[in-house]
Image (cartoon, helix red, strand yellow):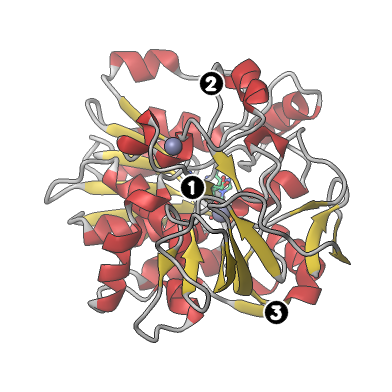
Amino acid sequence: MKATCWMGRKKVEVRDVPDPKILNKQDAIVKISSTAICGSDLHLYNGFVPFMERGDVLGHEFMGEVVEVGRGVKNVKVGDRVVVPFPIACGVCEACKNELYSVCENTNPNKWIGEQLFGHATAGIFGYSHLTGGFAGGQAEYARVPFADVGPVKIENGFTDEQVLFLSDIFPTGYMGAEMCNIKPGDTIAVWGAGPVGQFAMASAFLLGAERVIAIDRFPYRLKMAQDQGAEIINYEQVGSVIDALNDMTGGRGPDACIDAVGMEAHAPGVKYLYDKAKQATRIEMDRPIALREAIMACKPGGTVSVIGVYGGFIDKFPAGAMMNKSIRIMTGQCHVQRYTQKLLGLISDGKIDPSFVITHRMRLDDAAHGYEMFMNKEDNCEKIVLKA
Ligand code: NAD
Ligand code: ZN
Ligand code: ZN
């Protein structure tokens, strides 16, 4: 089959690789109809996750048709159309029983790496390095889906792929980001990053009852998409200080909650950026936590900072003083996708949201390398690319 392979830093290639096979009785094989490139893939592309090997198959946002199932699979059958959540979850461990699927205790065969780096391992994740199990991803023609009874969401009502594909990751992720803010009527929620994840965090904040949402980014077309959803905007390249701007917009109090939908590859105007970029390049720090610092500094005392942007390691100049002295509540996590899929499918069915609003580009799987470059450089007003297998 054809698959998008990581071939080194800033190098992906669509190559011929062996078809996936059923390895365990709880596996299914899915023939992929649509898949997408995520901001998380850029961290691999740019070489910030040091557990990739040449030839690893990328992709963790995918859907398609079940073409084969292991003899232990009960909930899906050949011919079913499914969306596959990015965390692989067993459904029966302590974490899964508590709906903490992205930290499932049973699905990551490379636990020792996570234990050394994080104290404990995360769940297995499709196409997301050997740190999360080394599972082949879904930017391919087929994928092996372990624990097929636990993850895949059956799509039965004639939705288009584009309406439901993002149940695999970015819609639940944005939703979880907003849910962690414990939104009350009248609340103002600031969102750093108007990428696809930030857009779903904003949409979800409104769905959960926020009165105001403030989007922070530098790309006018991304800010425009946020504005079209009803958000107010700050272009951080056009204000002296994002924190001052947020204070001005909130009577000096700061937003009730702040969502970091940027993560480890944040950008900033001026020397702040060079400082973190140099430290990251020399591996003195692993992440550039520019948005995270700003979110903690901007947040209202007693408010919540919800971190859905991905971080990988250790950071510098973390404002622990602001966090502690202002009674900030920090909430975070890789999304526990399986916890949200039915509820969010319901919102799509009820016409409360059409997740396809983020899609700006459609390409063939063969053009994935071009897609990565375009999404990475935010060329041609690119917000989200769907690849058709
Ligand atoms: P993206 O690259 O399209 O968007 C990131 C946006 O952040 C860009 O628009 C960029 O201009 C903006 N940005 C950079 N520096 C900024 C700053 N200092 N202030 C404000 N905005 C800034 O990526 P995406 O697909 O939207 O993903 C965003 C993040 O979410 C990534 O870190 C990704 O890994 C993460 N993510 C997390 C989960 C999860 O489960 N928690 C799931 C999916 C993605
Ligand atoms: Zn993703
Ligand atoms: Zn589990």
Sequence-earlier tag: 3 or 2? 2
Quadrant in which residue 323 is drawn = top left
Nearest to viewer (mark 1 / mark 2): 2
Residue linked to disc 3: 363
Q: CA distance from mark 1 to mark 2?
A: 40 Å
At numbered mark 3, what does the secondary structure look like: helix, strand or loop? strand
Indicate whether 169 appears above or below 271: below
How far from the left and from the top, in percent, is residue 297? 40, 28
User: In the rendered structure, which amino acid carries the disc numbered 2?
Assistant: His
Indicate whether 195 appears above or below 30: above
Residue 356 visible in image: yes
User: In the rendered structure, which amino acid carries the disc numbered 3?
Assistant: Met
> How many badges with numbers are in the image?
3
Q: Nearer the viewer, residue 39 or 250?
A: 39
Residue depicted at x 48% and y 33%: 292
Residue linked to disc 1: 239
Q: Is mark 3 within 8 Å of ligand 1?
A: no
User: In the rendered structure, which amino acid carries the disc numbered 1?
Assistant: Val
Q: Residues within 10 Å of mark 3 (few under 14, many from 20)?
A: some
The answer to the question of whether label 3 and label 1 lie on touching residues, with beta carbons closer than 8 A, is: no
Residue 194 visible in image: no
Q: Is residue 325 left or right of residue 131?
A: left
Q: Residues within 10 Å of mark 2 (few under 14, many from 20)?
A: some
Residue linked to disc 2: 120
Sequence-earlier tag: 1 or 2? 2
Q: Quadrant of the C terminus?
A: bottom right
